[in-house]
Amino acid sequence: MGYLTVAKEHERLEEIKGSRFYAFVTPLKTFDDVDAYLNAVRGRYADASHHCFAYKFDEYVRFSDDGEPGGTAGRPMLEVLNKRGLEHVLAVVTRYFGGTKLGAGGLVRAYSGSLAKALDEAGTYQVKDRCNVTFEVPFTAMDSVHRLLDDWAELVKGEPDFTAQGMVLAVNLLEADLESLKSELVAVTRGDVRYLE
């Protein structure tokens, strides 16, 4: 299935009626990255008034208004992530209060708008599902198999192992390419390929 996330870590500053809004977005490789990134932002801007956030990582979805009136920051930020169909992403908007109250509607627009602009600048990236396959081919097919695998741009090939019967090779590739690879392996080995658990 895969998922859509932000293409890169990005930060932008916007000033609204004297308040400064720093919007941060980052793709998440693991769930542990959430706390590490939040702590880094909070440490960098320790004197800020608020650190509102929203994140989505598989079944983990959370948001926080961090002291702003309920429903004016974290939830609108999460709605921006949802509308864009983003996953494995963390968004933080840090606010330095500038002395002018924005009201509930103004806060919603400021937080969601700052985040939306940061996402526009960061861009998106489609993460595609990958799978691992281990197979054995006879020694006579080794060169043909190596040439075949060298033509697969997004395939990652491990170091081969050898048995009495031939070469054992583990590869990582896009799930969508699995059946094509299997067909081509049958062709270059004349059907003499065995898949291992």
Image (cartoon, rainbow, N blue to C red):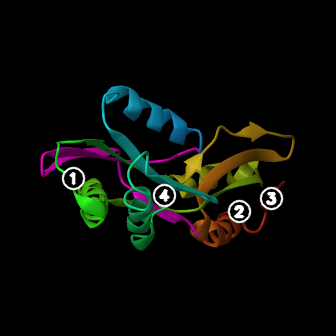
Residue type, numbered disc 2: Thr
- Sequence-first tag of 2 and 1: 1
Instruction: Find residue 33 and report its horizontal and vertical position in percent.
Output: 53, 39
Instruction: Find residue 24 and report its horizontal and vertical position in percent.
Output: 33, 46
Q: Is residue 136 left or right of residue 50?
A: right
Q: Is residue 88 left or right of residue 170?
A: left
- Sequence-first tag of 3 and 2: 2
Cα distance in 3D space between marks 2 and 4? 16 Å
Q: Which residue sits furthest right?
A: 164
Which residue is at a point 58% across and 44% down the rendered structure image?
30
Asked which quadrant contains residue 183, the reply is bottom right
- Sequence-first tag of 2 and 4: 4
Which residue is at a point 12% across and 52% down the rendered structure image?
17
**Residue 154 versus residue 73: which sits nearer the camera?**
73
- Sequence-first tag of 3 and 1: 1
Query: Which residue does the numbered mark 3 point to in the structure image?
Result: 195
The numbered disc on residue 151 is 4
Which region is colored magenta? Answer: 1-30
Mark 4 vs 3: CB contact within 8 A: no
Q: Is residue 158 magenta?
A: no
Classed neighbour count for the residue bearing mark 1: other residues with Cα under 10 Å, few (<14), some (14–19), many (≥20): few
